[in-house]
Amino acid sequence: MVGLAEVVAVSATVGATRSRLAKVDALAGLLTAADRAEVPAVVAFLSGAPRQGRIGAGWRTLSALTGPPAAEPSLAVLAVDALFDEVAAVRGAGSTARRAELLGGLLAAATADEQRFLLALLTGELRQGALEGVMLDAIARAWERPAPAVRRAFMLSGRLPETAVAAMDDVLADIGLELGRPVRPMLASPGATIAGAVADLSPCAVEYKLDGARIQVHKRGDEVGVWTRTLREITEAVPELVELVRGLPCESAVLDGETLALADDGRPRPFQETMSRFGSTREEQVKALLLRPYFFDCLHLDGRDLIDEPLRVRARALRAAVGEHVIPGVLEPTAEQAEELTSQALDAGHEGVVVKDLDSPYQAGRRGKAWQKVKPVHTVDLVVLAAEWGHGRRTGTLSNLHLGARDPDGGPPVMVGKTFKGLTDDLLAWQTRTFPEFETHRDEWGVHLRPHVVVEIALDGVQVSTRYPGGVALRFARVLRYRPDKTPAEADTIDALRGLLP
């Protein structure tokens, strides 16, 4: 039986080392010691999120419930996981008091180290929340399974605990694409120039890079489901997309694409307006801000899974399935055609283009550089670590941002710079109102945040720096927008920023 204290000890070991190999060894050791029933909870806890997701208790609530710690560890992982099930199921009148009663009892039975771990786990502050890649390597190591098979199973299941159990049972190959269960999305890496990306990936496709929101759509007859890039279902919020997909000339399909709201002149509306639709089902807002889909990949069509087929095969299926709703692009363009398409995309108000290797299968995340996004301005997605109180006209507002890049080996975000440029009055008001929700502590100069908020930053490049621990600093960084559609695990890595060094 695995105790919570053992999980806490491994978490501390992982957090204390920068060696990816040491992290994998520590995680794999605990996984092999766990019983089959314990594996899902152990994986979830060490990955930074309970299996149950958010359970309705924030930092202030939990802090108020934390009293004197237990002298000796007594909590078992399965018992803690079962209590989380009970807390997540609480509904109706008196639910707040009942959740407090359950969580207060849990914290009272925890040692000081266990209390700190539980608070971090339940509030999303556990620094291993971006540990997916390391955990997948640990799962492969624990049961001596091929790493590509583990990654593929995770892409198709979307869940680390289920992937770990499948690896333990040696049934990874049994996890396939399933209609109604979203697939983790394939992502594009930054490309320096359109000519360089086309030369690297030839034969390739070049497509518009839209300033929209990622969607994945599943169709089975008249049943349609729509998910975001983080696998959050938004079907009820996008009835116009559901109706459009129902009318496509196919019986079943899994489609990957982007959606955005367009102005009357056909140019994209601001990204925030598109995202606002995902949180609302009000009929008047739906009518006022209709979304238009642009599909760029097809993972399944009429009973045939295409996820392992090369992009050129998926592209043919896509055109057969969606017709005019395919994203603008060119297959196997010349260098001149690729440059022309890039100009057209920019003239239409879009971000740039994505260049894709036509021989590549669909693989979750940024596996290599089979997809490369090329924009005229460098942009990166970073994690907000802290915000300083403003001065002068900005007195009373949270202004200057401390920015961190993701550690690909699962450590805390690595600070790479600060900026207050690009912050409008509306953004300053939003930051001041919102950041305290994610506050860990504050001092005389500002508020420190747990890793949660992702912001898109434009920059002129990076430079070598001894000031920041990652060895690089941003040059002329300015805020473009916040990315509520992205988690810290999807922020750009410190390695990606180092790759921008001249």
Image: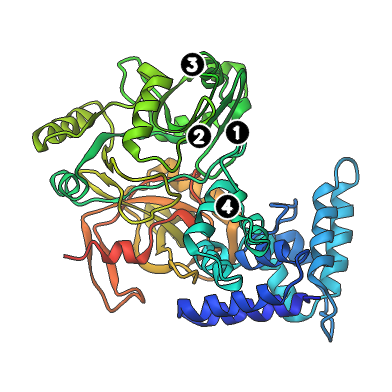
The label nearer to you, 2 versus 1, is 1
Q: CA distance from mark 4 to mark 2?
A: 23 Å
Q: Which residue is mark 4?
A: 173
Q: Earlier in the sequence, mark 3 or mark 1?
A: 1
Q: Residue at x 57, y 52 (%)?
A: 173
- Location of the N terminus (image quadrant): bottom right
Which SS class for mark 1?
Answer: loop
Q: CA distance from mark 1 to mark 4?
A: 17 Å
The label nearer to you, 1 versus 4, is 4
Q: CA distance from mark 2 to mark 3?
A: 15 Å
Which SS class for mark 3?
Answer: loop
Q: Which disc is residue 248 wearing?
A: 3
Q: Earlier in the sequence, mark 2 or mark 1?
A: 1
Quarter-wise, where is residue 388 in the image? bottom left
Q: Is residue 112 above or below residue 293?
A: below
The label nearer to you, 2 versus 3, is 3
Q: Which residue is mark 1?
A: 179
The label nearer to you, 4 versus 3, is 4
Residues 367 and 99: in front is: 367
Q: Is residue 185 above or below residue 472?
A: above
**Residue type at numbered disc 1:** Leu
Which SS class for mark 4?
Answer: helix
Residues 197 and 270: in front is: 197
Q: In x, y percent, where is residue 152?
A: 51, 52
Q: CA distance from mark 4 to mark 3?
A: 31 Å
Crowding around mark 4 (Cα neighbors within 10 Å: few <14, some 14 to 19, many 20+) is few
Q: In x, y percent, where is residue 432?
A: 52, 51
Q: Which disc is residue 216 wearing?
A: 2
Q: Earlier in the sequence, mark 1 or mark 4?
A: 4
